[in-house]
Image: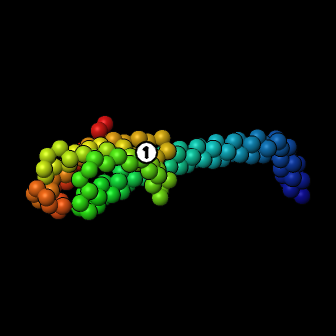
Amino acid sequence: MKFILSMVKKLKASLRQTKGYALPLVLVLLALIITAASFLLAKQMNEFSMNKKSKDYEICLLTAKNAMEIVKAEIEAGNTAPMAVDQMDANGGSYSFQISQTAADRFDGLINSSYADYQKTFIICIWTAGEGSCDIKDFYWKMEI
């Protein structure tokens, strides 16, 4: 019996020594969890920002491609007079183009497109099937940097 009582006293003494370690341990673990969560949140916010910039860039390019198709449609419709248009796109961007006939079967011009913080300029060159023809034989474009 003495042995059991001595063991109980030692157990109580050992419990007193560890008393107070739980709170610091919980605080350290909580600090680590909050640090990891804030790191992951910052990473997600950065990724969201980059995705938005990429989307804006793609819409700027698509706005220019829409303008290119409008120019091709105008030439195929037989419009050989110099054209200059500044218009809003359905996507929220804007485009402008200046096209003129430089030879009997050639049209040259510029297309400017913008969306959000992006602005792009394209040089286009269009060849028709021949003098008096409205059929487009070749269409080239180059994006200026």
Residue at disc 1, secondary structure: strand
What's the residue at 82%, 42% (across, down)? 20
What's the residue at 48%, 41% (across, down)? 117
What's the residue at 23%, 53% (across, down)? 80
Q: Which residue is mark 1?
A: 114
Depth order, front residue of 133/53: 133
What's the residue at 78%, 46% (across, down)? 22
Quadrant that contains the C terminus: top left
Left or right: where does residue 6 sit relative to residue 90?
A: right
| Residue 119 point in image, percent of width and height | 41, 41
Q: Amino acid at mark 1?
A: Ser
Determine if residue 36 is in view: no
| Residue 46 point in image, percent of width and height | 53, 44
Place residue 136 in its image quadrant. bottom left
Determine if residue 53 is in view: yes
Left or right: where does residue 35 sit relative to residue 71?
A: right
| Residue 49 point in image, percent of width and height | 52, 46
Place residue 89 in its image quadrant. bottom left
